[in-house]
Every structure is written in structure tokens, then in C-alpha cells.
Image: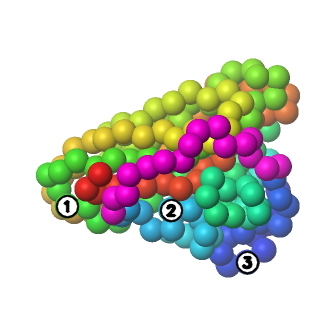
Amino acid sequence: MALPSSSLGFVDTPPPPPPPLTLASLARRCENKIQNPSFEYGVDPWLAMVSGSWATRGVYTSGGGGHQGSNFYYGHSNSTVDSTLTISQSSISIPNGGQVECAAWVASRRPGNIGSTRVEIFLDGQTCGIGYLGTTGWTRIAGKVSVSGDGAVHTLAVVAISDEASEEGWQFWLDDLSVGVGC
């Protein structure tokens, strides 16, 4: 496993480039409450948690590699059985009582096209969006949820799950996350 080469959480070994963009990246502009949504400043303030075996994971830089910009989060699981990658950010300031749109751009590579990658986005445990990917180019997963709770501080989590894969495992890219207010 490659070790971070700087305090930003970048790693030395570049992953393969993600599959090409397949959908137009048109989106309405709204106020994004996420900090460092495109990993352009490394991994902070994101928290990554995994289960199963992972050959490598972290923030990578590639001239044409991210959905937009050069940085993205990448993980390569070398597991042929269950494995999960969760990326989360807490302390997101959103006023309670309204609706927000949660979104993320994701891509997946599954050698042999065995199994699928299930990606689910949560805001405070509520499902914002869900998608199933095989080997895909960048795909936007999004949805709207109502914001409630005791305070105005919330948590976003993106969970990528594979229940089976080929001997080569599976790969996952994540970029351009948002929690949009006023969409």
C-alpha cells in the first residue's frame, strides 16, 4: 500500500484513469455546504472507513482524472467478497426545516463485469440517492431530503459496497460532492 507523500493525504502511486465521462455535467447552481468537495486540498475534512481488503485508497491527482479538476478520491479493493468504502464529512452547517439536494459523481471499474458497485448517499442517515454501477464512466447520483434535527450541524456519507468481484477486485472513483441549499 502506498503511503501518503504529504500532509494533504496525497499518495505516490497513481491509479489508472477513471472511465471517460458519459453524461453531460450540467447542474443548477446552488450553495454547496460541503468543504473540499472535489478533494483539491487533499483528504481533509473527509473521513474514510473501509471493511474488507483494500490494495490502495486515497486522494489522487491526474490531469484528466477527476470529474472536474485534477483531484479525486480513488479506492481499489482486491477483495473477491464483501468490501465497503465509506467517505463522510461531519459538521456541515445547514439550516433545519428545509430541503437539500445531496449529490456525488462516481465511477466504477469491475474487471470481468462481475458483481456491481452499490453507491448510496446519506445525510444524517436519510438516503439521498442510490445507484448500482458496473464498469461505468462518471455518473451522478443525487436526491433530495428534508433537513431536521436538534441543531444545524449535519453529516454526509457516501457508501460504496461490493458483495463480489473478480480476482482483480474492483475500483471506485468519487468526486464533486455537494449538499446544495436553494436548488
Q: Locate residue 121, reporting x and y percent.
A: 44, 42
Residue 19, above or below 35: above
Q: Amino acid at mark 2?
A: Pro
- Label at residue 172: none
Q: Is residue 120 magenta?
A: no
Q: Earlier in the sequence, mark 3 or mark 2?
A: 3
Given contact means CB atoms under 8 Å apart, are the residues at marks 3 and 1 in contact? no
Q: Is residue 123 above or below residue 47?
A: above
Residue 62 x/y as whole percent: 77, 62
Label disc, if present, on residue 6 of the rendered structure: 3
Of discs 3 and 1, which sits in the foreground? 1
| Mark sitting earlier along the chain (2/1) | 2
**Residue 113 vs residue 3, the one in the foreground:** 113
Q: Quadrant for residue 32, please give it.
A: bottom left
Query: What span is in magenta?
Result: 16-31
Q: Which residue is mark 1?
A: 95
Foreground mark, 3 or 2, reads 2
Q: Which residue is mark 2?
A: 37
- 20 part of magenta stretch: yes
| Within-10-Å neighbours for mark 1: few <14, some 14–19, many 20+ | some
Say what secondary structure mark 2 lies in: loop
Q: Amino acid at mark 1?
A: Pro
Whether residue 84 is visible: no
Distance from disc 2 to disc 1, alpha carbons, whole Å, reads: 19 Å
Q: CA distance from mark 3 to mark 2?
A: 19 Å
Indicate the position of residue 53 as horizontal and vertical percent values.
73, 41
User: What is the chief secondary structure element of the magenta stretch?
Assistant: loop
Query: Image point 76% across, 22% down: which residue?
Result: 113
Q: Which residue appears at 42% of the width and 63% of the height?
A: 34
In percent of width and height, residue 105 lies at 55, 46
Depicted 165 relative to depicted 48: above or below? above
Name the residue type under label 3.
Ser
